């Protein structure tokens, strides 16, 4: 039921009570763009899921605005029905990414059965416009290869003499007010910001490549800051989320290792339907039948999209460190967890370069690492690089130290041996984008850059 309030002119209005379901990113963006400073709505809370330890906090008044002098509480999504009842919620707004269609509708059913409406906000309702050209790079699932593609695109722009800013989908796990606008130009900037492993996995490769990286809870302020230092902005989206900014070129990545997922996950399917260019990634390690299945699905659902195929060849500096050795494989955490992959680049590299045995880390999992395997039972004998807090980073290091292996194969985008200081011999797996066949992405980018160069010249 809506709450009646009295406006300054004496008229009574009803504020619609809203609960926003989130995971520390899209939820705050939806609030900022649709609900903040709008007196017809009263956002009574956010919920949190997917990421550990991001509930039991408050969205601070500095970000919430004048209608929320005490800020807005953040609850666990586990208590959804109780929250809808106790908070007298009129409308539940779904605001996170990488969820199967069936699980999304289960959430909707729970909300509707408890008496609340269920709402999805469109891209048009939530995208911010920029004074600079924007290329958005999104995906149909977590772990498709967005960030390597974003680095590929950024490199093409830098080589053309353009100033590039990459805005990363934010990961506000700490002090939200301090994370309103963040700028990263060096590894030291990440140290000062006390970035988690998940944040470092996304920021560090861009910084090492020479990209200027921005992130933040206040996405409009972040955009305006980036505009002052860039000729072109790349939106490097998280998971399979929709763009936060209105793109001039919309690129979406699909993964032939997960055929069919491009039309069965939200909001990956809307991304597919919106895309101007669809990149089929990792075709060098996928089954050809799966590549063609995804290609056919893209053509069926978005026949106007240009389809580009790319490889993501794996490399290690010292293959002898793997050959014939007992190895512990560490993979990118989100790709394995809510991305649903049972393996990643590290597993493929261990097999390709001749490891004698993959040591199963599950019996050696310490502290918070053990429950990750219970929450995501599809994971095989590999270790996800989970590190959402200092405690979890310590648990990860202790797990690595406990596994009886000869070599640690690190396929996380961040240099974990430097960050965690484990003493076992290690080798990093690297992977970058390579274009295959025709059409290629580079001519599309060149045409796009020609328009930017003309605008800069004027």
Image (cartoon, rainbow, N blue to C red):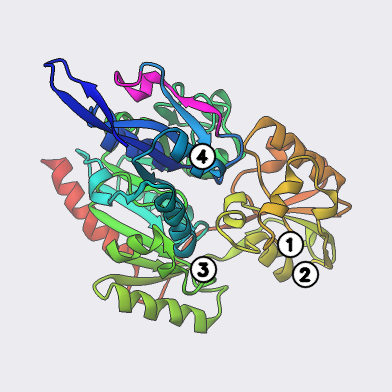
> Which is more foreground, mark 4 or mark 1?
4
How crowded is the residue under tag 3: few (<14 C-alpha within 10 Å), some, or many (20+)? many
Q: Secondary structure at mark 3?
A: loop
Q: Which residue is mark 3?
A: 282
**Distance of label 4 from label 2 (alpha carbons):** 53 Å
Name the foreground residue: 116 vs 393.
116
Q: Residue furthest right?
A: 404
Q: Position of residue 288 (x, y in %)?
A: 51, 82
Q: Earlier in the sequence, mark 2 or mark 3?
A: 3
> Which is more foreground, mark 1 or mark 2?
2
Q: Which residue is mark 2?
A: 354
Q: Position of residue 75 (x, y in %)?
A: 52, 34
Q: Is residue 222 left or right of residue 197?
A: left
Say if residue 106 shows up in the picture: yes
Q: Earlier in the sequence, mark 1 or mark 3?
A: 3
Q: Secondary structure at mark 2?
A: loop
Q: Which residue is mark 1?
A: 319
Q: Earlier in the sequence, mark 4 or mark 2?
A: 4
Query: Do tag 1 and tag 3 residues touch (Cβ < 8 Å)?
Result: no
How crowded is the residue under tag 1: few (<14 C-alpha within 10 Å), some, or many (20+)? some
> Which is more foreground, mark 4 or mark 3?
4
**Distance of label 1 from label 3 (alpha carbons):** 21 Å
Q: Which residue is mark 4?
A: 82
User: Magenta residues, as a range?
Assistant: 55-68
């Amino acid at each position: 039921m809506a709450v009646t309030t009295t406006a300054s002119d004496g008229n009574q209005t009803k504020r619609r009570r809203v609960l926003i379901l989130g995971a520390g990113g899209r939820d705050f963006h939806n609030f900022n763009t649709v609900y903040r400073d709008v007196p017809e709505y009263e956002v009574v809370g956010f919920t949190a899921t997917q990421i550990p330890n991001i509930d039991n906090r408050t969205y601070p008044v500095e970000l919430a605005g004048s209608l929320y002098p005490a800020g807005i509480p953040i609850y666990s999504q586990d208590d959804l029905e109780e929250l809808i009842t106790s908070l007298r919620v009129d409308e539940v707004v779904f605001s996170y990414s990488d969820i199967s269609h069936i699980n999304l509708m289960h959430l909707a059913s729970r909300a509707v059965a408890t008496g609340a409406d269920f709402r999805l906000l469109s891209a048009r309702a939530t995208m911010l416009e920029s004074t600079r050209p924007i290329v958005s790079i999104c995906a149909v699932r977590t772990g498709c290869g967005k960030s390597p593609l974003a680095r590929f695109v950024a490199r093409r722009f830098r080589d053309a003499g353009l100033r590039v800013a990459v805005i990363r989908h934010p990961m506000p796990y700490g002090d939200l007010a301090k994370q309103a606008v963040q700028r990263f130009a060096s590894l030291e900037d990440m140290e000062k910001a006390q970035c988690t492993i998940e944040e470092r996995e996304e920021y560090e490769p861009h910084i090492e490549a020479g990209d200027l990286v921005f992130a933040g809870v206040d996405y409009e302020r972040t955009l305006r800051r980036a505009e002052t230092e860039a000729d072109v902005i790349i939106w490097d989206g998280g998971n399979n989320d929709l763009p936060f900014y209105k793109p001039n070129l919309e690129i979406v990545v699909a993964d032939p290792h997960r055929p069919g997922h491009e039309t069965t996950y939200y909001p990956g399917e809307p991304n597919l339907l919106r895309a101007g260019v669809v990149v089929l990634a990792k075709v060098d390690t996928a089954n050809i039948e799966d590549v063609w299945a995804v290609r056919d699905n893209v053509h069926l659902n978005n026949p106007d999209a240009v389809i580009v195929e790319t490889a993501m060849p794996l490399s290690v500096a010292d293959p002898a460190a793997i050959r014939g050795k007992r190895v512990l494989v560490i993979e990118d955490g989100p790709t394995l967890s809510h991305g649903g992959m049972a393996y990643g680049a590290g597993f493929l590299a261990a097999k390709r370069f001749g490891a004698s045995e993959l040591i199963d880390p599950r019996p050696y999992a310490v502290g918070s690492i053990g429950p990750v395997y219970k929450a995501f039972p599809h994971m095989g004998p590999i270790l996800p690089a989970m590190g959402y807090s200092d405690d979890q980073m310590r648990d990860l290091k202790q797990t690595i130290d406990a596994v009886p292996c000869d070599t640690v194969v690190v396929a996380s985008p961040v240099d974990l041996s430097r960050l965690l200081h484990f003493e076992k011999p290690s080798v990093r797996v690297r992977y970058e984008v390579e274009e295959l066949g025709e059409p290629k992405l580079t001519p599309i980018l060149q045409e796009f850059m020609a328009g930017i160069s003309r605008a800069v010249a004027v």
